[in-house]
Every structure is written in structure tokens, then in C-alpha cells.
Amino acid sequence: MLEMRIIMLVNDYPGITAAEICKRWSRTRGALSQMLKKIEEKGFIYREKNDTGSRAMGLYVTDQGVETINEYTIRDFQDDTHIVGYLLEECSEEELRAFYKVIECYCGVLQEHPETHWKGY
């Protein structure tokens, strides 16, 4: 799942560097480097020198990576549709909308403040 999230991030931000991903996700370079190496060996991403003049290598998704993202998105949508059907058997549409609104806000807080662990609250 983490590998797929990385592939999708690289697809959304072509040329993103490993350092930028580390900063964004609060990961160590060593841990991320191992994951990137695996993903690259599987043929989902490739590295290319950035035009910025720095030594940083930009990350890009291969055609195989794009196909994998498309397949994942379709399966994820089908799973979501199936789950929503089950939830609607127990919850009203209004309750589901409120639930998804809370989840959306919660995800926003986590993305804006990844260093905060919210312990004790």
C-alpha cells in the first residue's frame, strides 16, 4: 500500500525528489531510499536528473506505473462502492455525508501537521 501511495505521489508531482517526499511524509532518507529502489526495480518509476542544476534526481512514473495506478483506482472505486452499499444498509445518507466530512477534515489536519501526534487529547 505504501509503495502504491509513493507511485501515486510521483504521478501527481512529476520530478519530485526523494528529499521532498521525506520532508512531506516525515520519513528518513534510508527508509524511503529502500522503498524507491524496490519500486524502481519493479519498473513503476524511474529517476532522471532535474533541470535545476542540483545533483537531485527527479522521480517519474513509467507507463507500467500509470497502468498500475489506473487498475488500482478502478479496484479502489469498486471497493468503495461496495462498502458504501453496506453502510447505507445501517446508516442514513446524511450520516454518511457527515462521516466523510469528518474524515476529510481529519486527513487535512494530518497533512498540514504531520509532526503532531495529538497524544493526550
Image (spheres, rainbow, N blue to C red):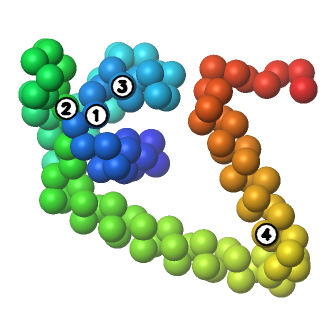
| Quarter holding residue 91 | bottom right
Q: CA distance from mark 1 to mark 2?
A: 5 Å
Pinpoint residue 79: horizontal percent, then vertical percent: 56, 73
Looking at the figure, which quarter contains the C terminus?
A: top right
Image check: 118 left or right of 84?
Answer: right
- Disc 3 residue type? Glu
Task: Work out whether residue 41 can be spotted.
Answer: no
Pinpoint residue 4: horizontal percent, then vertical percent: 39, 49
x 36%, y 25%: residue: 20
Pinpoint residue 30: horizontal percent, then vertical percent: 35, 16
Q: CA distance from mark 2 to mark 4?
A: 39 Å
- Residue bearing the label numbered 2: 58
Mark 3 element type:
helix
Please report contact status of discs 3 and 1: CB closer than 8 Å, yes or no. Answer: yes
Marks 2 and 4, the one that precedes in the sequence: 2
- Disc 4 residue type? Arg
